[in-house]
Amino acid sequence: MWTPTGPALLFCPADRPERYSKALDRADMVILDLEDAVAPVNKAAAREALIGNPVAADRVIVRINPADTAEHAHDLDAVQSTSYRLVMQAKVESAAQVTAHGLPTIALIETPLGALRVEEIAAAPNCVGLMWGAEDLAAGMGGTSSRFEDDEAHPGRYRDIARYVRARVRLTAAALGVAAIDSVHIDIADVDGLRAEVRDAVAQGYTATACIHPSQAAPIREGYAPSAERVEWARAVMAGALEHDGGVFALDGEMIDGPVIAQARAVLSRVTSA
């Protein structure tokens, strides 16, 4: 199973090669973007920049244009001319769109049809991860926003359909054993909102969170790194599990059984990756 080298994945326009190394310095992996971040007139130049400015291949994901666009085949040719092999395919709507090229693929679920077919897509042999996109999803339904703007209790909270797709992507990724990447938080200044969203992603078992600005990488890393208190709890749970041969036991008044032991194991797994 593929997993990213860390939880903060930063988008970088592929037509801005001077930013490649800077992005890698700030984030765990960089998503060199040939799709939305690049104006149509600059697509060819972006592919040339991708080929001509190599960076650490094990920390790069290349976002390619959707399968039903003229740019898609050109993007695949460009990727084949580099040492990069992991792609993020935009607006995936079927497993066939992923299997057609055979490259290890993070399928971006951001259209209504893609959301309805997410289980089929994740089952494609070369699908190694799922990510979802809130704004394209809203636009694809004729909507105007993926979030509530006037919810005083939860400012910026996702609307119901976005929350449904977010949950469905996470559930599907867990069921089929692929990585799950949470969507970007587009309000760069809303650091508190980003932190809250990351905490929620971690609680649901998301593997990583994508971001659009270098300043967002640090809050994402902090959110995925468990607190010292949580690590201490997890280590105590694992020690108790060893002492009791994995059976039920009590720890500080809390009943510890199999599911709780699994949660403690998940906490400790993030100590290394954070």
Image: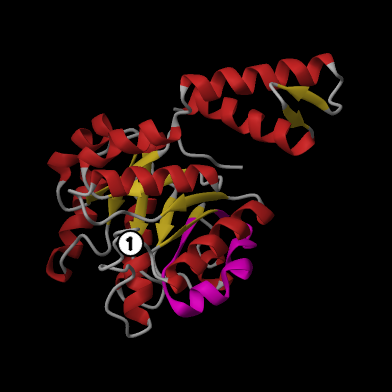
Along the line of sight, which residue is nearer the eye, 126 or 117?
117
Q: Residue at x 24, y 56 (%)?
A: 47
Closer to the camera, 39 or 225? 225
- Quarter of the figure with residue 142: bottom left
Magenta residues (range): 106-128
Q: Quadrant of residue 22?
A: top left
Residue 31 can be seen, yes or no: no
| Whether residue 84 is situated above or below residue 151 in the rendered picture | above
Give the residue at x 50% y 79%.
113
Q: Is residue 101 left or right of residue 257?
A: left
From this viewpoint, is residue 1 visible? Answer: yes
Is 143 left, or right, of 163 in this rendering? left
Label 1 secondary element? helix
Residue 221 location in percent, x, y?
37, 33
Judge left or right: residue 135 versus residue 234: left
Residue wearing tag 1: 75
Q: Quadrant of the N terminus?
A: top right
Q: Is residue 41 above or below residue 169?
A: below
